[in-house]
Image (tube, rainbow, N blue to C red):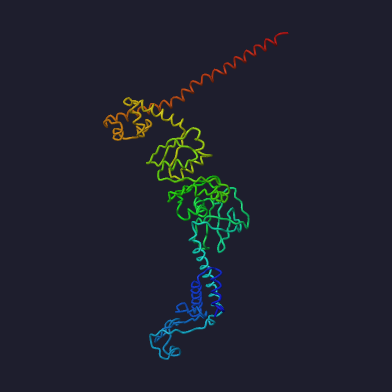
Amino acid sequence: MLITDIKRVIDQVSREKGIDPEVLINTLKEAIVSAARKKLGPRADIEVHYDGKTGEVEVFHFKEVVEEVEFPDNELTLEQGYEFDPECEIGDSLGIRIDTEEFGRIAAQSAKQVIIQKMREAERNAVYENFIHKKGKIINGIVQRFDRGSIIVNLGQAEAVLRPREQMPRENYKRGDRIRAYVLDVLEESKGAQILLSRTHPEFLMELFKTEVPEVAEGIVTLQGAARVPGVRAKIAVSSTDSDVDPVGACVGMKGNRVQNIVQELRGEKIDIVQWSPDVARFVCNALSPAEISRVIIDEDNRSMEVIVNDEYLSIAIGKGGQNVSLACEITGWHLEVTSEEEYSREVKLGYDSLMKLENVGLPMAEILFKSGYASLMDIVETSPEELASVMGVSEEEADATIAQAKKRLMEEQAAAEISPHLSEKEEQPEAEEQPEADDTADETDSDVMDENEAKP
């Protein structure tokens, strides 16, 4: 045989590379068929039999018995057939056992190349199959080397890549360090499976909670979503299927030990654990904690909210660099605009004042319009007569007239706003022109004084 003790070789490769023995056996058969056809002809009908108990390989070349041979690769005459089976007849197919040593050195080398190629393909497929089910999970590895900013991680059977954008800021590793990361994707490529890792993905945070909090692993506490500014701050929304279990407390742990383990893994990243609620307004209030919310104005059509907070909580609600409100937007899926009470009151007053400029709108009607979402002249202009008529309790003709009046008022305000800067420039211009004259006079006076002084003896 081409390979001595083939059974031992197959068992060893299967054990070391994690490849199914059946895959290796099929690879061996394909290699032998390829080598046989190089020796016997491309049309040769070759069958290979492998005995899994003894490791013996038998190769048969099947030929059809014909009266006149046209294709020597797979045909033979009746006289030739008698040499292998004295009872053969025209049309029979005879399996002629051949010795693999007859293939010759070139055929054997070809078989070896096919075996190597097929084993590499089988190994690549085995790596892909072993890691594809780990996608979306946390995996441990050892830093092996660095490549243009990427970290190459040794996972045992394969290597993975932690690209620069998936690395946390101010996080340094050296060769040989242990590393935990989230399996972002497993790609099947021609050179082999490529495993992509991440330490910045929000799912990495959620998987860490699954490993640290037993209630999450058991399904009592549910992770509803997460948002991160990697290495700085994160928010994670949690809920409980058991009314007796506090989801936030379960994730924090006794004296904060559970969440602290995660914070240490994330190099000090601050984590806000937010209680999820089916009431979106309450959920938003929880997401903006520790700021205290005064009121929430919901615009369901645009999935946006105006959140009003006390003046002293405005900076807390927004957060450093807008991080708190940005993470709250991401975790809730709503666009949030945070406003202070003072600013909101000012906007309300301006809205009332603009609405009361309309002839048929007094304070009671302004309140009705404001509560119905018409907070400015622009809102009146953008609505339809039918909708405005139903809100104001008037006819569509009267509503249409109100809209026309609002358009007129709005155009007057815009025109006044455009003229105002020009007036300011004209008012400032004479002062700018008069100033040099005063300076020139002063210079002339000074010059006259100097001449008089110089004229004195």
Residue farthest right in this picture: 457
* Relative side of 277 to 437, left or right: left
Horizontal and vertical percent position of residue 430: 51, 19
Image quadrant where residue 384 sits: top left
Quarter of the rendering containing residue 87: bottom left
Q: Nearer the viewer, residue 107 or 292?
A: 292
In the rendered image, the quadrant that contains the N terminus is bottom right
Residue visible at 59% across and 54% down? 148
Q: Please, which residue is most extreme toward the bottom here?
A: 86
Vertical placement of residue 50 versus 394, above or below: below
- Nearer-the-camera pick, 335 or 345: 345
Above or below 343: residue 426: above
Between 423 and 295, the one nearer to me in the picture: 295
Q: How many marks?
A: 0
Percent position of residue 364, x then y: 33, 27
Q: Position of residue 450 (x, y in %)?
A: 67, 12
Image quadrant holding the C terminus, namely top right
Picture coordinates of residue 302, whole percent (x, y): 39, 41
Q: Residue furthest top?
A: 457
> Relative to 88, is 444 above or below?
above
